[in-house]
Amino acid sequence: PPASSQKFYITFGPTNSGAETGNIIFTHDASGSPDSVSVSGTGVEPGFSVAPASVSFGNVTVGSSKQDSVTVTNTGTSTLTISSVASDNGEFSVTPAAGSVPPASSQKFYITFNPMNSGAETGNIIFTHDASGSPDSVSVGGTGVEAGFSVAPTSLSFGNVIVGSSKQDSVTVTNAGT
């Protein structure tokens, strides 16, 4: 009707990152038809990259721990939200358990290997995030080793030794651990 208006809603739904432009064209029966409204927007998305892709702790004594780190970099154009970081093996732990990384920035995550038994252990540190390809993981591995002690012989007898002189003998100490 004359002297009235109607609102049209325009939605921008980018399918990839980068700048987009376009026009909304209104064809009508008034003079000057068609009319257009220019529109623009930029699609943004986070990107996930982690280095190194694997961590080897080598030999670690049972009952002690060793720490290393990985670095997550946001290669995208919007903030990367890491909602969960977890280990699938209880002998490896990671902190922090979540994070938020601005574009072109990085954050370190610290992985600790705390072997409870001797022997090789492997696992994955799993990053759940809002970038494409989620979840991502870092493989981890290490070997729990135990110190062992043996001495032979287990006794020495020096017999009679003249006062003011000395007699020498030896024992062999062996690390019988893993």
Image (cartoon, grey):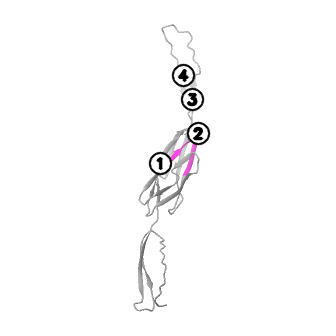
Q: Residue at x 57, y 45 (%)?
A: 91
Query: Mark 3 falls on what kind of element?
Result: loop
Front disc: 4 or 1: 1
- Residue 38 lies, in percent from the top left, at 40, 79
Of the residues under marks 4 and 2, which one precedes in the sequence? 2
Compute the Cα span from label 4 to label 2.
Answer: 27 Å
Task: Please rate how many residues cluster around mark 2, counting C-alpha atoms within 10 Å: few if below 14, some from 14 to 19, many from 20.
Answer: some
Looking at the rendered structure, which numbered label has been put on residue 149? 3
Q: CA distance from mark 4 to mark 3?
A: 13 Å
Question: Which callout, 4 or 3, points to the residue nearer the camera?
Answer: 3
Q: Give the mark nearer the N terminus: 3 vs 1.
A: 1
Which residue has dot 2 on it?
A: 118
Q: Secondary structure at mark 1?
A: strand
* Foreground pick, 80 / 65: 80
Sequence-wise, the earlier of marks 4 and 1 is 1
Rounded to the nearest whole Å, what is the CA distance between mark 2 and mark 3?
Answer: 15 Å
What are the residue bounds of the magenta stretch? 110-124
Work out whether mark 4 precedes mark 3 in sequence or the reverse, and give the earlier one: 3
Residue 51 image position (x, y, % from top left): 46, 53
Q: Residues within 10 Å of mark 4 (few under 14, many from 20)?
A: few
Q: CA distance from mark 3 to mark 1?
A: 33 Å
Residue situated in front as seen by the camera: 100 or 58: 100
The amino acid beneath tag 2 is: Ser
